[in-house]
């Protein structure tokens, strides 16, 4: 079936017990085990029919053997990292999401997991960072916030050759545009808070895994840690997921239009968007994904102009997060990547004048008109002495 049809019918498209359109909210923490409607349910941390419908849906959409739903993207990432043992070493994209960087460097390193951060867009750098203790590779493509492209087939192949666990954060592309398990990855993880839910009203994490044995290990950890997604949020996410393809198409069209306009403006020093000719790794992205996505990052010509722009722009939320029906403009240096030191940010090319725009469903012409009024230099207030 086409992906759009799978979005509607993936996993469970109706309640197996009543035939209701959509799986209802099974608001129960516990299930009578003598009269269980279906074998397997005892306690919601270990399994719940609403959450299970969502888990089946993400497994189907990513082409995995199993899916798992977590309380947040970071709960999903942290649970996956618990597969490793103290003393193991991981190679991770250097511009991985700031929260992933924080949990790796402030929690898992303390616990004994070694980490090397590399530019995953440089395939040889990934290979050169491997040590005898390396047990896994964790990458994002396109990455956050510079939309760097990693060659996913190469990385999955390298992992297979060296018997490493390959993990990819697919939050930016979603399975609508890119399905890393089909390229050979072992685990795909999402902040489902973003495009998959699409309405900026819940926090959620989803993962899908290629093989059943690994799925069993992760299900064990998910239950042991208890980082499961609540039933109401599972239901909302199931609902949001159904419109993923139409939302993604519209947001992507808006992003492509705005990226071109931004690239032509003198106030804009640089635009990062995998749909633009000359974007590093565009050819690789075109091979592994079916579209450039709905996130555009751009650097304004000065930090002062950036502050001015952020204070005057009206239509997008000026906020963290992305992937909602509303556009969201972020300032990575003070928001998503604030947990990095200024030196670490500079090393990664995240300047104080960098902005990341998640394009929502507004008419892009309205967003553009707003941008034009927001960066008018003649409106800059003279500095008070
Ligand atoms: C690429 C990426 N991965 C993971 C996360 C963490 O997800 P959550 O905020 O749902 O815990 C985020 C959040 O912004 C993200 O952008």
Image (spheres, rainbow, N blue to C red):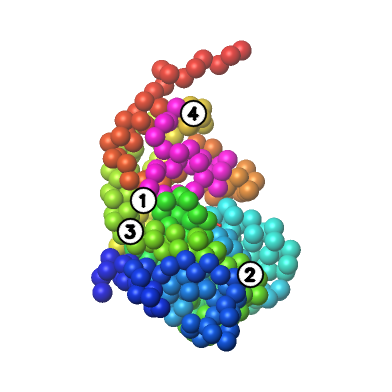
Q: Which residues are magenta?
A: 312-336
Q: Residue at x 30, y 45 (%)?
A: 254
Q: Earlier in the sequence, mark 3 or mark 2?
A: 2
Element class at badge 1: loop
Element class at badge 2: loop
* Image spot of residue 256 (x, y percent): 30, 47
Q: Give the labeled residue for mark 2.
A: 226
Q: Is residue 132 above or below residue 93?
A: below
* Image spot of residue 68 (x, y percent): 51, 72
Q: CA distance from mark 2 to mark 1?
A: 33 Å
In front: mark 2 or mark 1?
2
Q: Is residue 109 above or below residue 380?
A: below
Q: CA distance from mark 3 to mark 2?
A: 29 Å
Element class at badge 3: loop
Of all residues shown, which one is farthest toward the front? 35
Q: Give the labeled residue for mark 4.
A: 311
By secondary structure, the bulk of the magenta-drawn segment is best described as loop
Q: Does the magenta-highlighted stretch encompass residue 170?
A: no
Q: Give the labeled residue for mark 1.
A: 294
Q: Is residue 122 above or below residue 255?
A: below
Q: Residue at x 69, y 58 (%)?
A: 106
* Label 4 C-beta lies within 8 Å of the nearest ligand 1 atom: no
Q: Give the labeled residue for mark 3.
A: 243
In front: mark 4 or mark 2?
2
* Label 2 C-beta lies within 8 Å of the nearest ligand 1 atom: no
Q: Viewer-proximal residue, 15 or 356? A: 15
* Image spot of residue 75 (x, y percent): 59, 63
Q: Earlier in the sequence, mark 4 or mark 1?
A: 1
For the C terminus, the quadrant is top right
Q: Does the magenta-highlighted stretch encompass residue 322?
A: yes
């Amino acid at each position: 079936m086409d992906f759009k049809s799978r979005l509607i019918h993936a996993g469970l498209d109706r309640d197996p017990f009543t035939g209701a359109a959509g799986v209802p909210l099974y608001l129960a923490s516990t299930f009578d085990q003598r009269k269980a409607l279906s074998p397997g349910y005892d306690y919601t941390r270990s399994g719940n029919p609403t959450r299970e419908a969502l888990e089946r849906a993400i497994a189907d959409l990513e082409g995995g053997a199993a899916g798992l739903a977590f309380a947040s993207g970071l709960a999903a990432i942290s649970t996956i990292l618990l597969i490793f043992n103290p003393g193991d070493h991981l190679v991770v994209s250097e511009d991985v999401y700031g929260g992933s960087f924080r949990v790796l460097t402030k929690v898992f390193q303390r616990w004994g997991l070694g980490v090397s951060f590399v530019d995953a867009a440089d395939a040889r750098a990934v290979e050169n960072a491997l040590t005898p203790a390396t047990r896994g590779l964790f990458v994002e493509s396109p990455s956050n916030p510079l939309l760097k492209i990693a060659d996913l087939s190469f990385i999955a192949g390298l992992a297979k050759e060296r018997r490493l666990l390959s993990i990819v954060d697919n939050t930016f592309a979603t399975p609508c545009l890119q399905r890393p398990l089909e390229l050979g990855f072992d685990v795909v993880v999402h902040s489902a808070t973003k495009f998959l839910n699409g309405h900026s009203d819940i926090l959620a994490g989803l993962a899908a895994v290629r093989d059943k044995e690994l799925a069993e290990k992760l299900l064990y950890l998910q239950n042991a840690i208890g980082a499961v997604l609540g039933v109401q949020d599972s239901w909302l996410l199931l609902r949001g997921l159904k419109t993923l393809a139409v939302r993604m198409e519209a947001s992507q069209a808006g992003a492509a239009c705005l990226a071109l306009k931004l690239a032509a403006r003198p106030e804009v020093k640089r635009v990062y968007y995998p749909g633009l000719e000359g974007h590093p790794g565009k050819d690789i992205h075109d091979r592994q994904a079916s579209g450039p996505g709905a996130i555009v990052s751009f650097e304004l010509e000065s930090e002062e102009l950036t502050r001015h722009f952020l204070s005057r722009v009206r239509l997008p939320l000026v906020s963290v997060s992305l992937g909602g029906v509303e556009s969201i403009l972020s300032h990575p240096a003070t928001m998503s990547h604030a947990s990095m030191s200024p030196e670490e940010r500079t090393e990664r090319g995240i300047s104080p004048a960098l902005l990341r725009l998640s394009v929502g469903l507004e008419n892009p012409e309205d967003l553009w008109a707003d941008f034009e009024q927001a960066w008018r230099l003649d409106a800059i207030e003279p500095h008070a002495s």
